[in-house]
Each structure stands twice: as structure tokens, then as C-alpha cells.
Image (cartoon, helix red, strand yellow):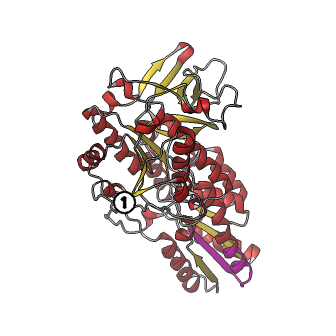
Amino acid sequence: MGSQSNFQMKVVPGEFGYVLQDVPHLSDYISDLQTYPNPLRSNPAYSVVKQYFVDMDDSIPEKIVVHKDTPRGVHFRRAGPRQQVYFASDDVLACIVTCGGLCPGLNTVIREIVHSLDYMYGVSKVLGIEGGYRGFYSKNTINLTPKLCNDIHKRGGTIIGSSRGGHDTTKIVDSIQDRGINQVYIIGGDGTLRGANVIYEEIRKRGLKVAVAGIPKTIDNDIPVIDRSFGFDTAVEEAQRAINAAHVEAHSAENGVGMVKLMGRYSGFIAMHATLASRDVDCCLIPESPFYLEGKGGLFEYIEKKLKENGHMVIVVAEGAGQELLAAKNEEDASGNKLLQDVGMWIAQSIKEHFAQETKMAITLKYIDPTYMIRAIPSNASDNVYCTLLAQSAVHGAMAGYTGFTSGLVNGRHTYIPFNRIIEKQNKVVITDRMWARLLSSTNQPSFLGAKCPSVLNAGNAGQLGTNDKVTGLLGCLT
């Protein structure tokens, strides 16, 4: 990754504090590239669209809340078709690969890349790389045609398979070069896109005319810069089913407690949004907000209070919440993600033991883990539309000669974002922000913060603290 400064985004300054963080282009390292008129000029679907081609100077601001005296700030290049393209349609051999865990919408993205290349640009040669990154060098491919992909959006998962790990940059780029592939579409999360960045850099070092386009995929919504990840809306909607079941079970029993564990390894967005959408949740636990079980102001005390008031309660816990309360497990999966302890089962058992031994209060606890059910479903209507636009934007960008970028929604507009902005950090719930305050006011749950914590949160440099600093500071308040 040390070559980022040479190969990554081009920073273009402008007046009034305007900064364009532009994405790389094939012409940056290959001279005298031939251009071609965009085939969309003669496409009947677009002949009626006025000003369909995006102006080269169009850009989208990263932040839209400004004061009258603030600079215009960081912008990204607007996504969309250009007047000229850098590939002749008959010469394009594209490939698509999906990596990492499953996510609603993967098949929709695959379908729309294939259909967009064919219907908009007349590209008929598209390969599916089977089984993630290692499929490049284990020679597993499938010919993706519009007919083959026509109905795949109705199914969950990915028709070309996925896996973690298996990234060998040299072997992958050798395979791309040997096969004559000149457009690579990579669908995956932050780890996958780090790999895509290295692939792009190696392709650039070799001087190959190969466009590398990413489409950010994470069900946890933990990729920065973009408004949201595809599949997130579907995941929140499906989580409602589990929360409703937990509520029914809890409401139907004396001192009933319904607990639902949702996805959220490091970021609690699914748990937070599902809680806000449900209105049946009494307590939401996420990785970004430390909590404790015993003592005054702890989770056990709050559960007892809610049961005495209402006779039942519902708890939502993200999978990465409360890991600091469990014994550390220094193991990683093939993608380099830390293997987490099952905090849901641990908290459920701890609650049962506490009320059986300490309070002698009989409770009925039902535990629901819908993780793989949520991951495996097809995307809903909202995500289907989003996946379509992401795929079309990626195809427009690659055909226009852009490379080393992901397509993504920024402030409601589709943009091209340099890889290094997407992989620089993880998007997390900010517990000093309004959205978490909205959740606390909706559930009326305690923040589980001690008396000293407001001074930590309100300190003048609180916004400058890193996530680890904030967690350390907050945990210190709990002791």
C-alpha cells in the first residue's frame, strides 16, 4: 500500500476552498489512447434523454451542511456516461468477482453489470470469476450472458460464489493479463477493496489497459464516505421479522425477555436502525457504546426495572457489542477479521443466571439469531433500485477509462470515489451524534455511562479522538 501517493487520487484545487478528490484514469499512465463515440448516442432508450451525458466538470460535495463563510470543501467526480469512451465494444472482455460474506443484492449487481454492458454498450463477453479472488488463478469461470442472469436478482447469494482470503496479487494480475481481460468489476467490503486497490496498482505498474472498478458491499454499512451500502436497507427490514417474533414471545410470557442478535462486527448500524424502525425494542447494545451488566445503572438493573413496569422487554444486541466483557480470542478468519465471541448467547445465559440466583425473579428468555437468514435473502425493492444504479455507474466509469475507483452514493448522488478514501477507515456509529441520541430517547434505555463520562464526551477535543480513545475513555467511566 506504500505506493498510494503515486497511484491514487488526483487532488485538484479550485476557488473558495474547493477540492476535487479525483479518481485515476487510464490516460494517466498510457499515452495516445484511442477514444470512441459513446454507443449510447444511438441507443433508443437514451435518445429522448436531454443532457444525458455528464459534464466533465460535474462534482458532488462530500459534506452538504455548511455555513456561509466555510470553504466549499471536498468533492468527488459525478458518476455517469461520458461523450467519449476508451474501449471499443467488441474489444471488451469484462469479468466480475464477488468476495467476502453474503449480502442481499449481490445477484442484482451482477445482473445489472452484465445487462448494462450488453444493452447500453454492446459488450457481449463477460466472465464470472467463481469463488472469490482465488477463482482468478484456479481457472474457474462462467460465461455471464443477459439470458443467464435475467432472473438471478430474485435469488439470494451470488451465482458466481464467494469466499474470504485467497488474494495473491501476482497470480490474479497474471490471470487477468493472460486471459486478455480489460475490465474488472470487484464487489466486496473493505478487505476486498483493499485487495482491489493492490490489483489496480499492479496493473498500473505493468502499464496494462485494464479498468478496475469496485462496488462497495457490506451488510453492516461500515464503509466510509458513501451514504449507505447496498443490502443494508433489506437487512434492516428483515431484522424487523426477528424483532417482532421476539416481541410476541416476550409479550406472551410472564416476565418475558426477547433477545435478538443482529449483524454488526464493528459497527452497530443494523441494530440501531432496526431498533428505531421497530419501536418494540427496549434496549439496543452496539459495539461503539460500552455497557456493563451488574451494579447500579447496569443492564441487569434496567431489565428488572422494565419487567416490573411492563411485564416484558425486548433486547437487540449487535454481534460485536460487549466483546471487552468476554475473554479475548486472538484468532482471525481468512479475510483477517477478528473472530468474535458469541456475545448474544453469553448475555442471554448471564441474564438467566442473574435472575435465577440474585433476584429469585422467574423470567422467560427467548433468544433469536437470524444472521444467516438475513444475509441469504434477495434484496428488497429499494436495494434493487440502488444496486441497479451502482452497477450502471460502475460500467459507465470503466467504459470512460476511469480505474481504481468505486461507485457510491454521496449525498443522494452517484459518484466515483478513489479506493484509498473507501479503505481508509471503517464507518461507525458515533455515540456523541444525534442519531444515537434519537435511539436513546426512543427506547428510553440508559446510556450505561458513569457520572464522569459527560466530561469525556463534551471535551473540546472529543471530536478529534479516535474510536479506540473514545472507547477507552468510556470504559474508564464504568469502573
Q: Secondary structure at mark 1?
A: loop
Q: In the rendered view, tell whether residue 61 sits above or below residue 131.
A: above
Q: Position of residue 135 (x, y in %)?
A: 33, 57
Q: Position of residue 98 (x, y in %)?
A: 43, 55
Identified at 39% across, 50% down, the residue is 192
Q: Position of residue 228 (x, y in %)?
A: 58, 47
Identified at 51% across, 49% down, the residue is 114
Closest to the observer, 131 or 228: 131
Residue most toward the right?
310
Identified at 58% across, 66% down, the residue is 377
Q: Is residue 365 magenta?
A: no
- Left or right for 214, reference 368: left
Task: Name the kind of residue labelled 1 in the image.
Answer: Arg
Instruction: Quickly name the residue at label 1.
Output: 164
Magenta region: 245-261
Q: Quadrant of residue 262?
A: bottom right
Closest to the observer, 18 or 309: 18
Q: Quadrant of residue 364?
A: bottom right
State which quarter of the image contains the N terminus. Answer: top left
